[in-house]
């Protein structure tokens, strides 16, 4: 992820090195190169436009700095603007004053929700929380079982509908899970919901119903970074159909160009809160815009 973008940006910025002074023409040429690099990395066009215009304006108006030469100054501006489109500050989980905190996961099938449920539970357990995983994906025959497997690997409890009760009502399961969490003193409830291969209305309605029924403190939209531009349109559909408070990017370990990571925050306004970069339960961490920007700029 980001390798090509990173190489391109580094070389564009390196071309400025050694210039004692940057003319507007130098800045325009650099901005053009950066624009191409971002578009090739699959960053959404409106995000590219905003980014380039901010970089250009700031670079042209840059104060002469005693500490930085002109090239370094442009690098600094590009870095700061990357951090800004990635969301600025690291956004922490919003914990409920009266536990349990309810975190709901939503996204397309295959985005990595169930895996993420395990990763997040393990991560929270490491911070002395006592998470309860809740199986509300009752569409896919194997989903409940998959969550149980993930839960046992993460060594956390799983609340699932009793087998043999038909498909069951996910809203009812979610409600009962919260009662159970209160009774058994789990301070965080992570609700795994059903996904479809494509966005569909019933899926949206179900997720929205669960969200309201459990009074979710956080709704995390889980998106596979490998799906490129589709990540942005899917995010917009979930924003309008369900609404979410944060984004989790999965499969950052994949060989993708990174456009999703760079677009989703700016397009939806919701912060990227976590990132997954592998199939193992430990391949997961809070998302830090500044670290990601540094990684991109090499
Ligand atoms: P769900 O349908 O949204 O619940 O998705 P799953 O959790 O079942 O994940 C779908 C597939 O993606 C599984 O094979 C996971 O092992 C894999 N997966 C999930 N997260 C990651 C990740 O960060 N990196 C990689 N490489 N694979 C992942």
Image: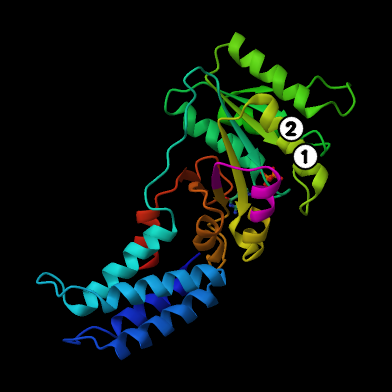
Q: Quadrant of residue 286?
A: top left
- What label does residue 209 carry, if any? 2
Mark 1 — residue?
Answer: 205
Find residue 242 and report its horizontal and vertical position in percent: 68, 42
Query: Is disc 2's CB within 8 Å of ligand 1?
Result: no
On screen, 224 above or below 34? above
Find residue 15 and report its horizontal and vertical position in percent: 30, 86
Q: Is residue 139 left or right of residue 100?
A: right
Work out which residue is located at the far bottom of the displayed protein and give it. Answer: 25
Q: Quadrant of residue 280?
A: top right
The C terminus, quarter of image? bottom left
On screen, 47 above or below 217? below
> Between 233 and 257, which is closer to the camera in this rendering?
233
Q: Is residue 127 left or right of residue 106?
A: left
Q: CA distance from mark 2 to mark 1?
A: 6 Å
Labelled pair 2, 1 in contact (Cβ < 8 Å): yes
Label 2's element?
Answer: helix
**Magenta segment range?**
236-247
Work out which residue is located at the far left of the displayed protein and give it. Answer: 66
Find residue 166 and report its horizontal and vertical position in percent: 90, 26
Residue that appears at 61% across and 16% down: 181
Q: Is residue 144 magenta?
A: no
Q: Is residue 244 magenta?
A: yes
Residue 181 visible in the current orientation: yes
Residue 160 visible in the current orientation: no
Find residue 185 and report its horizontal and vertical position in percent: 55, 12
Work out which residue is located at the far top of the displayed protein and give it. Answer: 183
Residue that appears at 75% across and 31% down: 144
């Amino acid at each position: 992820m980001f390798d090509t973008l990173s190489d391109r940006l580094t070389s564009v910025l390196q071309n400025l090195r050694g210039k004692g002074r940057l003319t507007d023409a130098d800045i325009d040429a650099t901005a053009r190169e950066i624009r191409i690099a971002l578009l090739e990395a699959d960053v959404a066009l409106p995000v590219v436009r905003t980014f380039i215009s901010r970089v250009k304006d700031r670079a042209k108006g840059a104060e002469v700095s005693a500490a930085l030469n002109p090239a370094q100054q442009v690098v600094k501006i590009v870095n700061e603007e990357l951090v800004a489109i990635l969301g600025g500050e690291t956004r922490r989980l919003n914990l409920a004053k009266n536990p349990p905190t309810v975190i709901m996961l939503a996204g397309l099938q295959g985005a990595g929700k169930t895996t993420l449920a395990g990763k997040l539970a393990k991560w929270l357990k490491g911070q002395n929380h006592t998470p309860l995983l809740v199986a509300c994906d009752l569409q896919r025959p194997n989903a409940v079982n998959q969550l149980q497997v993930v839960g046992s690997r993460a060594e956390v409890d799983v609340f699932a509908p009793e087998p043999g009760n038909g498909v069951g009502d996910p809203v009812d399961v979610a409600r009962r899970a919260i009662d159970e969490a209160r009774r058994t003193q789990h301070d965080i409830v992570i609700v795994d919901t059903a996904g479809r291969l494509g966005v569909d209305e019933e899926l949206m309605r179900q997720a929205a119903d669960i969200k309201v029924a459990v009074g979710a403190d956080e709704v995390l939209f889980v998106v596979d970074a490998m799906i490129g531009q589709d990540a942005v349109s899917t995010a917009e559909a979930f924003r309008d159909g369900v609404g979410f408070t944060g984004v989790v990017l999965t499969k950052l370990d994949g060989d993708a160009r990174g456009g999703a990571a760079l677009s989703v925050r700016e397009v939806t306004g919701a912060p990227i809160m976590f990132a997954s970069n592998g199939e193992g339960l430990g391949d997961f961490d809070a998302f830090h815009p500044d670290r990601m920007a540094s990684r991109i700029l090499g």
